[in-house]
Amino acid sequence: MDALQKRVPFSVEAEQSVLGSIIIDPERFDEVAQIICADDFYIEEHKDIFLVMHDFNLNNRPLDLVTLINELVNKGIYADEAAARSYLRIIGDIVPGSANARDYARIVHDKSILRKLLTAAEDIQEKVYTEGENVSHLVDYAEQKIYDIAGNNERTDFLHIKDVIFNIYDRLNVLKDGAGEDVLGLKSGFSDLDQYVVGMGKSDLIIVGARPGVGKTAFVLNIATNIAKRTKKAVAVFQLEMGADQVVQRIIASEALVDSKKLKQGNLSADDWDSIANATAELSETDILIDANPNITITNMKAKLRRVKNLGLVVIDYLQLMQGERRRDGNRAAEVGEISRGLKIMAKELNVPVIVCAQLSRATEKEHKKPMLSDLRESGSIEQDADIVMFLSRDYYGDDPEKANLVDVIIAKNRHGETATVHMSWLGQYTKFSTLESDLSER
């Protein structure tokens, strides 16, 4: 154990120099606090001193050697003023000045990251030795541990408005040059819908809600296929309700415009076979990845997605079938809320749009009621976490035979633009959506 302790990364001199810099120039505290926190100190005594300094800063109290010593004694960190003064004198002798306070803080921060890595490695090693975990779960756990440390390592500063203005000009020039999708976000491939959802931006969480049988799975698979074909980016589809064969069969039916029932039964004409051959040849050139594990969690998803190169989009069907990282007995709403929040965080971490199907409550079935945000089942957190919420509705038109194949795509929430209702065609036999009178005619 002693040998292990000797290898623990920390720097007494750097920690003392940070504290000494603040004693010399208390205004340095704000600079240092942007880089480190109290937990980044390895020596408990230094951590306690930093916390006292933090209290002075938080309460806007003047900090000097006298007031600091008095507070350290009052809080019981030192037994008396002599002990406090003795150690603070040592700190004062170590640091020559406060000019390099940020550099000292970076050293403390880096040593803290190394210790976190060491702790994570020991934790992973302990789990390996006990062999109490499923191997795949252990690998996911290890990846998540390291990823969390890396994610918490990010520090951001204020941006001056003139720098942001330059960024906006750069963006406008890119749009002028015709590279709009790279800047605005991915287009769904449905022209009318894309007029309102002006690109699914990186880190967007997009919810597609509908009652069972309305076509939400077909809708998101159509979008996924459109994007995979056009952008050549990888599109990951997590299907919690169907097997991979069923998913691909649906995609083939919609791309080949072959009756899905005939495709399932194998009752195909020569023309059907030709259409399927052409569609599958094109689909084989895409990078659509399918995971049909019904027990997958967000941690599992992130572990898999981090290995995907050139990832452009994630599709999940559907939210209420997902499992939380921890069970909440009798409180499914809280669990679903935790999942939706986790999905938003995942979208930000991976920097890609995430489309998630969601079930709506039975209230939408009453009197052909138009879906509303309050109809999202089991948790209001879904609405809060989402950047875009779209509902699919066919029942809204009742029994009007002239509108039997008409679907409303109701954009109920749109952080990047206006809300609206887009009318689309639903070709059920092909599990295919299309913009009215336009998209299919262009094929």
Image (spheres, rainbow, N blue to C red):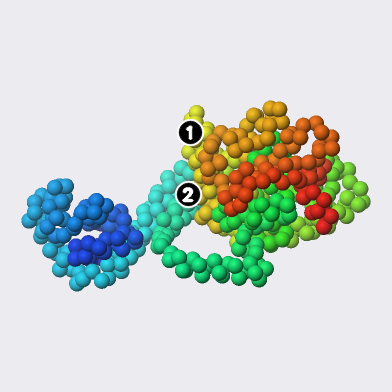
Residue 431 percent coordinates (x, y)? 78, 44
Q: Nearer the viewer, residue 200 or 306?
A: 200
Q: Going by the image, does 52 lie left or right of 332?
A: left
Does dot 1 land on a helix, a strand or a loop? loop
Q: Kindly report which numbered mark, 1 or 2, lies closer to the viewer in this rendering.
A: 1
Instruction: Using the rendered image of the protein, determine whether residue 90 is visible from the camera's viewpoint.
Output: yes
Residue 3 percent coordinates (x, y)? 28, 59
Q: Residue at x 67, y 68 (%)?
A: 178
Instruction: Specify the quadrant of the image occupied by residue 229.
Output: bottom right
Which amino acid, by three-letter code, is at mark 2?
Tyr
Tell me the quadrant of the picture where the C terminus can be found.
Answer: bottom right
Residue 141 marker: 2
Which residue lies under the disc numbered 1?
328
Q: Are marks 1 and 2 in contact (CB under 8 Å)?
A: no
Q: Residue at x 82, y 42 (%)?
A: 429
Q: Nearer the viewer, residue 408 or 223?
A: 408
How many numbered tags mark residues here? 2
Which amino acid, by three-letter code, is at mark 1?
Arg
Q: Residue at x 78, y 59 (%)?
A: 282
Instruction: Using the rendered image of the protein, determine whether residue 303 is visible from the camera's viewpoint.
Output: no
**35, above or below 295, in the image:** below
Q: In terms of sequence position, does the residue under pointer 1 or pointer 2 come before the other?
A: 2
Q: Going by the image, does 335 lie left or right of 421?
A: left
Q: Nearer the viewer, residue 289 or 58?
A: 58
Residue 239 marker: none
Residue 349 percent coordinates (x, y)? 51, 55
- Mark 2 crowd level (few <14, some 14–19, many ≥20, 10 Å Cα): some
User: Disc 1 versus disc 2: distance between alpha carbons?
Assistant: 20 Å
Q: Residue at x 68, y 56 (%)?
A: 187
